[in-house]
Image: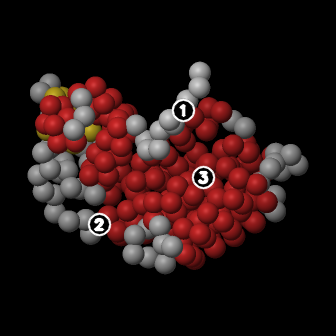
Amino acid sequence: MTITNPLRHPPLGDQLLAQLRSLIVRAELSVGTHLVEGRIAERFGVSRGPVRDALRQLEIEGLVETRKRGVFVRGLSDRDLVELYSLRGALEGLAVKEAIAHLGTADWALMDAAIEQMRAAAATPDPAKFAAADLDFHSGFYTLGGNRWLAATWALHRPLFATVLEITNTDRDLVPVADDHAELSAIVRSGDVAAALAALTAHLDGSCGRIRATLSGRPRPRPAF
């Protein structure tokens, strides 16, 4: 099959999903808000199919829940952030250990490229591109480890982390963050498992703390639909 006019933008369903996820994380959709398919479809100019798919994915991510009367916002609380980062630490710690086990054959080109992309996005600055490059870097540990089940589990949670990072990267100097990733990369490449895990823990703890501080100042929820 020949594609003569490739898509230049994400499909409408993906755009809708990203916007709803952002509204929930930013608390612009308050906890308990009833998400009515028809109203959302009308608001965003899409059919009900993409809306249904988006709500299903948001439920998998834990941001909404289905009750007898429909789908309602669960939100993202401070406790949720702590638990999410606890899960990420466990997953990524295993990914780092497996990556170190493959140091002899590891190709770090993609992770090096991600660091350069972070530096470029920090100079602009472009929080969205920085967040994407940030997560490309971390995803590299899973790729190097070669554990597809571990990588698949991380992939389920990556979109939510991307949204959170994009929000918290706004209005802050991103150059030191890029430098932190370069330092983490060097420590992991040294092959010292204990040092790598300690550096990863400090890295993720710092990220979690900044995100919690930023999101604690979210504006009071307002009706969106």
Q: Residue at x 39, y 75 (%)?
A: 171
In the rendered view, tell whether residue 202 sits above or below residue 47: below
Q: Given the current orientation, which residue lies at the most extreme top position?
A: 1
Q: CA distance from mark 1 to mark 3?
A: 29 Å
Q: Which mark is residue 136?
A: 3
Q: Nearer the viewer, mark 1 or mark 3?
A: 1
Q: Which residue is mark 2?
A: 216
In this rendering, position of residue 223 left or right of residue 142? left
**Mark 2 residue element:** loop
In this rendering, position of residue 42 left or right of residue 80? left
- In the rendering, at what x and y percent does residue 47 appear? 24, 29
**Mark 3 residue element:** helix
Q: Is residue 161 visible?
A: yes
Q: Nearer the viewer, mark 2 or mark 3?
A: 3
In the rendered view, tell whether residue 87 sits above or below residue 34: below
Q: Which residue is mark 1?
A: 4
- Residue 214 position by quadrant: bottom left
Report the number of discs.
Answer: 3
Q: Nearer the viewer, residue 40 or 92?
A: 40
- In the rendering, at what x and y percent does residue 139 appear? 62, 48
Image quarter of the N terminus: top right
